[in-house]
Image (tube, helix red, strand yellow):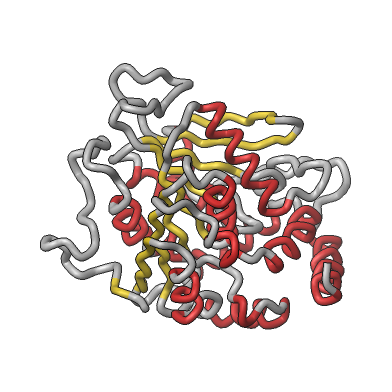
């Protein structure tokens, strides 16, 4: 760990001491609205223990005809599974509106990674590779094959790591606001960029993020932040398989993921589309989640099941021009 990252960890641990709950007190994630409670009531949720590590999985969308509850995605059954991966310090609760829209087209798995939300942290720091392995275990336990990975911020790093580790099996991904810009891989610079982007987020979104950060196991967040800062996503993306297809989405006001960085990442994989979301900042998956849906649907094969309300892929003759525009 570099001196800068050690300094960053000491700072975040100091903040953690201020906001952590008293010892022995269980912190539970409380959804902030009746609408969220209603959404959760329609979601099958389970806490799993995989190789000594806890992970929570939310399942949205009924299985297709003949598909078993525990084996939602079988090769050849014409179904698609979307796997949603959240950002650092957050749980997947904020991805529920996106999951509901994607569920019209297939099954959706939202994964609460270890140590986030109120999921117990692992005994040792996992790093991005360790988090990727946890998600791989979730997919293997559920019989999920060839999913569309949708990762936001740190979740984009996890998605890329999964593609690098299994280039033949994992080949489709939507990377939303993927960090960390290699030209600005410095803690204070990233903090400043985050604040610049936050100005363009809604008050509701800032409140949601604050609540999630305070609910997370803050000492675990302090441990994972240096891993996020030091993860060379550009090098790992270059290891994706020759059949990999990637879409990179970034907001117009996202100072963490400028056009130059999105373009550099795109150059590391054979087939990649970069799309700019007008008016958005770092949290594209919340306020502009229809744009993420449209991007995800471009990765579906012809024989994969669509719902009756399929969104229009960007750039098609029926596209109304809202939500996505070509990036670099």
Q: Is residue 141 left or right of residue 253?
A: right
Q: Most extreme residue toward the front, as rendered?
A: 242
State whether residue 15 is above or below residue 191: above
Please identify the quarter of the rendering in which residue 314 is found.
Answer: bottom left
Q: Is residue 315 visible?
A: yes
Q: Nearer the viewer, residue 163 or 110?
A: 163
Q: Nearer the viewer, residue 242 or 294?
A: 242
Q: Is residue 323 left or right of residue 268?
A: left
Residue at left offset 42%, top offset 65%: 248
Q: Nearer the viewer, residue 7 or 183?
A: 183
List x then y, in percent, for residue 55. 65, 37
Q: Most extreme residue toward the left, as rendered?
A: 317
| Quadrant of the rendering where the C terminus is positioned | bottom left
Please identify the quarter of the rendering in which residue 236 is found.
Answer: bottom right
Counting every numbered tag in the picture gives 0
Q: Is residue 4 left or right of residue 199?
A: right
Residue at left offset 58%, top offset 29%: 46
């Amino acid at each position: 760990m570099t001196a800068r990252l050690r300094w960053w960890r000491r700072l975040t641990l100091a903040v953690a001491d201020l906001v952590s709950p008293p010892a022995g007190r269980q912190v539970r994630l409380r959804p902030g609205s009746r609408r969220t409670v209603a959404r959760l009531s329609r979601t099958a949720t389970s806490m799993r223990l995989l190789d000594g590590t806890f992970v929570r999985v939310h399942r949205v969308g009924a299985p297709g005809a003949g598909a078993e509850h525990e084996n939602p995605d079988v090769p050849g059954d014409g179904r698609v599974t979307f796997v949603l991966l959240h950002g650092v310090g957050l749980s997947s609760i904020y991805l529920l509106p996106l999951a509901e829209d994607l569920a019209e087209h297939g099954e959706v798995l939202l994964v609460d990674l270890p140590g986030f939300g109120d999921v117990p942290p692992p005994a040792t720091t996992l790093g991005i590779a360790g988090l990727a392995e946890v998600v791989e275990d979730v997919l293997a336990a559920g019989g999920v094959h060839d999913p569309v990975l949708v990762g936001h911020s740190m979740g984009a790093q996890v998605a890329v790591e999964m593609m690098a580790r299994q280039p033949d099996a994992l080949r489709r991904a939507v990377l939303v606001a993927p960090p960390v810009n290699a030209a600005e891989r410095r803690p204070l610079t990233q903090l400043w960029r985050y604040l610049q982007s936050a100005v363009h987020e809604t008050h509701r979104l800032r409140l949601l993020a604050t609540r999630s950060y305070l609910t997370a196991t803050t000492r675990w967040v302090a441990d994972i932040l240096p891993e996020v800062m030091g993860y060379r996503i550009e090098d790992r993306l270059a290891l994706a398989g020759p059949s990999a297809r990637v879409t990179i989405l970034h907001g117009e006001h996202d100072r963490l993921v400028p056009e130059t960085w999105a373009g550099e990442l795109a150059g590391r994989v054979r087939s990649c589309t970069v799309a700019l979301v007008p008016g958005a900042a770092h949290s594209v998956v919340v306020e502009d989640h229809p744009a993420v849906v449209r991007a995800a649907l471009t990765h579906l094969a012809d024989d994969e099941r669509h719902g009756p309300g399929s969104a229009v892929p960007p750039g098609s003759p029926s596209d109304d021009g809202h939500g996505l525009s070509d990036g670099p």
